[in-house]
Image (cartoon, rainbow, N blue to C red):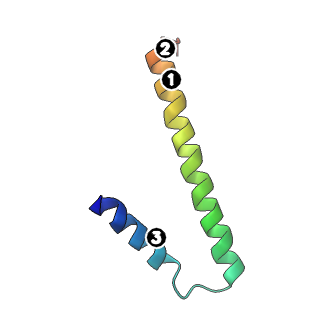
Amino acid sequence: MGTLSHFRTLYSEAFDNCKPEILVVLLKVYSVFCALMLVMAVYAFMYRALSGFEF
């Protein structure tokens, strides 16, 4: 749990004193989008690998 807390702290500090504010919002939305795409890619790979699909 300490690792997740550390990543949360790094994420928060990365956007401190960053201007303009709209850019900060766009970067945060983009980072969440990238995380979701990464999770979907890992899920799709695991589904194909475990269900016996041919690659």
Secondary structure of the residue carrying numbered label 1: helix
Secondary structure of the residue carrying numbered label 2: helix
> Which residue type carries mark 3?
Tyr
Mark 1 to mark 2: distance in Å?
6 Å
> Which residue type carries mark 2?
Ser
Mark 2 to mark 3: distance in Å?
36 Å
Q: Which residue is mark 3?
A: 11
Q: Which residue is mark 1?
A: 47
Q: Which numbered disc, 2 or 3, marks the residue that appears first in the sequence? A: 3
Contact between labelled residues 2 and 1, with CB atoms less than 8 Å apart:
yes
Q: Label 1: how many residues lie within 10 Å, few (<14), some (14-19) or many (20+)?
A: few
Q: Which quadrant does the N terminus fall into?
A: bottom left
Q: Which residue is mark 2?
A: 51
Q: Label 3: how many residues lie within 10 Å, few (<14), some (14-19) or many (20+)?
A: few
Relative to 36, is 52 above or below?
A: above
Relative to 4, is 42 above or below?
A: above
